[in-house]
C-alpha cells in the first residue's frame, strides 16, 4: 500500500542523514563514463528537428492559382528522414526573398503514413497580396532545395477532448488539413467520423474532389458535402455554411466542429456556431491566419499613425527600422531584413514571443495568444501585434 506523507510532518534531518550514505555509495560505484547519446534525445531530435532540409520532388498543378508540392528529404543537406506528424499539423517554410527573411505556415495535405514513406505534400493557393504564396507558386520547381520546420500545431483530433464525430468546415485551401485527416482515417491511423462541409465558389473551384471521392469508397467514416456559394447544382448544397446546414448533417448526439479557411469564413461561421450552443471545447479553429491592415477592426484606434519607427534589439545588435503601421511588427522587421524567430504567424505558437520595452501596440482579439504572465510583464507576439506608436522591442533571432 502506498504510504501518504504529510509535508508538514517530514523531518529534513532524516534526509540530511542519508547524505553520507549516498556519498559512500557513489564513491564505491564503478567509474562508468556517461553515455554520449541518450535514446530519448535521439527520438526527440527525430520527431522535433529544429529544421528539415527537403527538396521539391514533384509539382502538381491543381488550378491556375493552386499547386501541390511533394517534398522529400534532402540527404545531401543532412536530413535523412521526415519527422512524423499528426493529421492536421502544419510546416513552417523558411524563405529568403531578396533581402527579406520570411516564414509561412502551410498545413500538410498528405497523411502521417506518407511521412514515414518519405514524403510530405503541401498545397499552396495564391492569396491576394500574398508575397510568399506568389513567390512559391512562381518559383518552386522540381529539384529545388526547401527548408521547413518540424511539424507543428494543435489542429488535430484528440479522442479525450473531441467528440467521436467531427463536422469539418473548410473554405478554399482550408481543405488541406482535412485531406490529411481523411487519409489517416482511411488507413486506420485515426479513428473518428469526419463529415466535411466544404465551401467553394463553384464546382470548378473544388480542390481534391477526386481524392475525397476515392477515400469515400475506402471508408464510410468520411463524408464530404460540397457547398457552392455561386452555383446551383444537383447533389451539391447551395449558399454558405449556416447553423441550419450544420444541424442537417450533424449526428443526434455530441459532435465537434473543426474550422479551417479564410478569415471571412471564420467571421461568418463563428456567428452561426453561436446558435448551436456547443460546448467551447467542441469548437476548434485552425490558425486564424495572418491579419493585414487592422484599420476598422474592433478596438483599433481611429487616430493611429501611418508609419512607425521600431528600435529592435536582437542578440547583441540594435537596429532602428521604419514601416507601415498597417503591417504587423513581424512583417515590418522582415521587410527590413531582420531575421526574427517565427512559426505560425497567428499568435498561437509563441515562437516570436518578444519583450516590449516601450511603446503601445494593438493586438486583435482573435489572434491574441498571450498568457496572463505575458500581459503582466509586457511581452507580445510581433506576428499578431501592430504598433500604435514608435516602439522599442527585444526579439528572439531566427535559428
Ligand atoms: S509566430 Fe507563432 S506566435 Fe508569433
Image (spheres, rainbow, N blue to C red):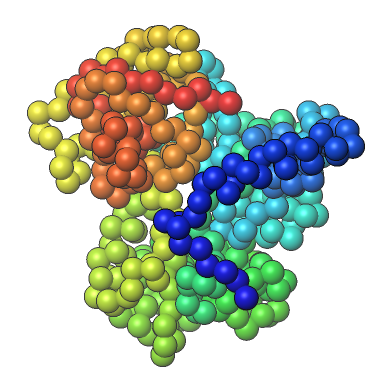
Tell me where residue 316 appears, x and y as whole percent: 47, 10
| Residue drawn at point x = 58 percent, y = 31 percent | 94
Nearer to the camera, 24 or 174 = 24
Residue 116 in view in this figure: yes
Give above or below for 256 relative to 393: below
Nearer to the camera, 80 or 177 = 80
Give residue 303's quadrant in the image: top left
| Residue drawn at point x = 64 percent, y = 71 percent | 190
Tell me: 76 left or right of 64.
right
Give residue 260's quadrant in the image: bottom left
Residue 67 in view in this figure: no
Residue lying at the far bottom in this picture: please name it: 252
Residue lying at the far left in this picture: please name it: 303
Please tell me how many numbered marks the rendered image carries.
0
Give above or below for 21 relative to 251: above
Q: Quadrant of the C terminus?
A: top right
Tell me where residue 224 appears, x and y as whole percent: 53, 75
Tell me: 28 left or right of 93.
right
Q: Quadrant of the N terminus?
A: bottom right
| Residue drawn at point x = 34 percent, y = 10 percent | 320
Give above or below for 250 relative to 346: below
| Residue drawn at point x = 58 percent, y = 49 percent | 14
Tell me where residue 274 appears, x and y as whole percent: 25, 71
Tell me where residue 24 appears, x and y as whole percent: 78, 38
Tell me: 242 left or right of 306.
right
Give above or below for 207 relative to 239: above
Amino acid at each position: 500500500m502506498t504510504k501518504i506523507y504529510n509535508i508538514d510532518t517530514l523531518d529534513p534531518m532524516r534526509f540530511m542523514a542519508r547524505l553520507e550514505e549516498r556519498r559512500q555509495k557513489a564513491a564505491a560505484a564503478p567509474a562508468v563514463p556517461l553515455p554520449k547519446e541518450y535514446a530519448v534525445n535521439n527520438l526527440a531530435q527525430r520527431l522535433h528537428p529544429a529544421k528539415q532540409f527537403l527538396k521539391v520532388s514533384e509539382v502538381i498543378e491543381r488550378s491556375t492559382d493552386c499547386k501541390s508540392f511533394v517534398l522529400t528529404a534532402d540527404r545531401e543537406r543532412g536530413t535523412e528522414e521526415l519527422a512524423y506528424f499528426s493529421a492536421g499539423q502544419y510546416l513552417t517554410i523558411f524563405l529568403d526573398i531578396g533581402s527579406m527573411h520570411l516564414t509561412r505556415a502551410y498545413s500538410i495535405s498528405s497523411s502521417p503514413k506518407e511521412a514515414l514513406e518519405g514524403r510530405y505534400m503541401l498545397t499552396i493557393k495564391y492569396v491576394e497580396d500574398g508575397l510568399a504564396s506568389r513567390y512559391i507558386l512562381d518559383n518552386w520547381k522540381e529539384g529545388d532545395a526547401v527548408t521547413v520546420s518540424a511539424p507543428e500545431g494543435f489542429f488535430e483530433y484528440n479522442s479525450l477532448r473531441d467528440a467521436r464525430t467531427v463536422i469539418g468546415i473548410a473554405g478554399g485551401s482550408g481543405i488541406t488539413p482535412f485531406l490529411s485527416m481523411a487519409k489517416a482515417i482511411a488507413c486506420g491511423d485515426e479513428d473518428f467520423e469526419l463529415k466535411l462541409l466544404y465551401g467553394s465558389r463553384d464546382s470548378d473551384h473544388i480542390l481534391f474532389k477526386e481524392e475525397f471521392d476515392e477515400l469515400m469508397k475506402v471508408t464510410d467514416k468520411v463524408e464530404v458535402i460540397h457547398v457552392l456559394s455561386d452555383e446551383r447544382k444537383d447533389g451539391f448544397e447551395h449558399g454558405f455554411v449556416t447553423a441550419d446546414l450544420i444541424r442537417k448533417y450533424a449526428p443526434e448526439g455530441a459532435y465537434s466542429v473543426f474550422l479551417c479557411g479564410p478569415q471571412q469564413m471564420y467571421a461568418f461561421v463563428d456567428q452561426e456556431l453561436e446558435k448551436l450552443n456547443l460546448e467551447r471545447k467542441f469548437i476548434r479553429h485552425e490558425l486564424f491566419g495572418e491579419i493585414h491592415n487592422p484599420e476598422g477592426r474592433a478596438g483599433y484606434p481611429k487616430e493611429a499613425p501611418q508609419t512607425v519607427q521600431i528600435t529592435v534589439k536582437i542578440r547583441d545588435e540594435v537596429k532602428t527600422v521604419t514601416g507601415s503601421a498597417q503591417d504587423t511588427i513581424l512583417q515590418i522587421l522582415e521587410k527590413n531584413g531582420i531575421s526574427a524567430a517565427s512559426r505560425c504567424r497567428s499568435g498561437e505558437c509563441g515562437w516570436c514571443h518578444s519583450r516590449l520595452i516601450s511603446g503601445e501596440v494593438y493586438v486583435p482579439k482573435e489572434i491574441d495568444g498571450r498568457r496572463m504572465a505575458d500581459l503582466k510583464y509586457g511581452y507580445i507576439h510581433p506576428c499578431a501585434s501592430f504598433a500604435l506608436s514608435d516602439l522599442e522591442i527585444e526579439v528572439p533571432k531566427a535559428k
